[in-house]
Image (tube, rainbow, N blue to C red):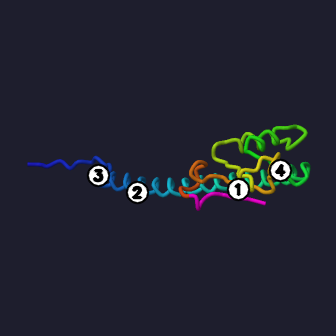
Amino acid sequence: MHIKKSNQSGFTLIELLIVIIIIGILAAIAFVAFNGSTKKAHKADAQSTVASVKTKLGEYSTDNDGNYPASKADVVTYLNDANGGNSKELATTFGDAGYEYTPSPAGCDNTTTVCSGFTVTGKAGTLGFGTSPADDVTASN
């Protein structure tokens, strides 16, 4: 009796499973690296926006005898004004829910109480680069 030898070649099931597992591990590493880069990019964007708004508020103060806007809406209006901040893109970005403007002293309105300071904050949780208030990007005068 003669037994025929099979000449078929190919991969075994174990070899294929090992390759699939290795590809899965590499994909997980790439995903984690990409996610970290995305958060860094969001934070850099927020830092840039906050710094730009701070600069524009310095211009506002110069034009308004040292006073600052009384509300976020006033800041956005100034940024949109061709004779004021003249920065519609910055106005759109800052008008986003992820940014806050707080004039000081509290309750100032530039009629009875002068707004002599401000704090601009990029909220980490809303803008996608952190989860706690400690991660927020802040600038003030």
Q: Which residue is mark 3?
A: 12
Disc with the residue nearer the chain's start (3 vs 4): 3
Disc 2 is placed on an element classified as helix
| Residue 22 disc label | 2
Q: Which residue is mark 1?
A: 47
* Type of amino acid under label 2: Ile
- In magenta segment, residue 96: no
Name the residue rendered at 71%, 54% in the picture. Answer: 106
Between marks 3 and 1 in the image, the one whose residue lies nearer the viewer: 1
Disc with the residue nearer the chain's start (2 vs 4): 2
Specify whether 101 is left or right of 85: left
Q: Specify whether residue 89 is in view.
A: no
Between marks 2 and 3 in the image, the one whose residue lies nearer the viewer: 2
Percent from the top left, x then y, of residue 133? Answer: 58, 58
**Location of residue 48 (image quadrant):** bottom right
Q: Nearer the viewer, residue 72 or 20?
A: 72
Between marks 4 and 1 in the image, the one whose residue lies nearer the viewer: 4
Disc 3 is placed on an element classified as loop
| Distance (Cα) linking label 2 and label 4 | 52 Å
**Which stretch appears magenta?**
133-141
* Type of amino acid under label 1: Gln
**Location of residue 54 (image quadrant):** bottom right
Q: Residue furthest front?
A: 112
Between marks 3 and 4 in the image, the one whose residue lies nearer the viewer: 4
Disc with the residue nearer the chain's start (2 vs 1): 2
Tags 4 and 1 touching, CB below 8 Å: no
Disc 4 is placed on an element classified as helix
